[in-house]
Image (cartoon, rainbow, N blue to C red):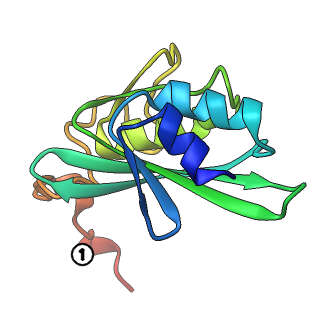
Amino acid sequence: MNWHEFQRIFNDCELDGDKIVIKSKLHEVIRFVTQNYTYRILEEIIAIDKGNGETELIYHLYSFEDEEDLFISIIVKDKAESIVDIFESAIADENEIYDLFGIQFTGNENLKRLYMPQDWQGFPLRKDYVQDDTRLAWNDDNEA
């Protein structure tokens, strides 16, 4: 990947080690990378709660042709652009991140809880999540 060309087109980005950090235009950046380079596989989307209501999303792309990984990172508050129209497999990661971190993916019409019950309040992988729900406690009566 030609970093200088990429930076010229998307001037609000920077290189941080092996990760491209962008501030906006997530969908546009992912579309550009898949159309102009050989990154055709979305390995995963990783979410990291940074505190203060900010979540870092890291998009891990892979090129079989070049045998190369690419990481694209963006900090979001409560919303991010969906990329399910680019990578259909993103629906699973976006739903998981919605369920556990509460990030709304605009453009994903099928956001739903995957692991937590539908009536669950809060998002258990956020740093501000209060874990005082009795459903999380061990049941002393069932211990061997």
Report the number of discs.
1
Residue sitting nearer the eye, 74 or 48 = 74
Expressed as whole percent of the image width and height from the top left, the position of residue 6 reads: 56, 42
Q: Element type at marker 1?
A: helix
User: At 53% from the left edge and 67% from the top edge, which residue is drawn?
Assistant: 18
User: At 27% from the left edge and 48% from the top edge, which residue is drawn?
Assistant: 55
Residue extending furthest right?
Answer: 65
User: At 26% from the left edge and 55% from the top edge, which residue is drawn?
Assistant: 49
Callout 1: 10 Å neighbours few (<14), some, many (20+)? Answer: few
User: Left of 81 or right of it: where is 4?
Assistant: right
Mark yes or no: residue 70 visible. Answer: yes
Which image quarter holds the C terminus? Answer: bottom left
Vertical side of 3 occupied by 118: above or below: above
- Residue 106 quadrant: top left
User: At 20% from the left edge and 36% from the top edge, which residue is drawn?
Assistant: 121
- Residue 65 quadrant: bottom right
Expressed as whole percent of the image width and height from the top left, the position of residue 53 reads: 14, 44
Expressed as whole percent of the image width and height from the top left, the position of residue 22 reads: 39, 43
Q: According to the image, label 1 marks what residue?
A: 140
Residue sitting nearer the eye, 34 or 80 = 34
Vertical side of 11 occupied by 28: above or below: above
User: Left of 72 or right of it: where is 60?
Assistant: right
Mark yes or no: residue 114 visible. Answer: no
Expressed as whole percent of the image width and height from the top left, the position of residue 109 reads: 51, 13
- Residue 103 quadrant: top left
At label 1, the amino acid type is Asp
Residue sitting nearer the eye, 81 or 31 = 31
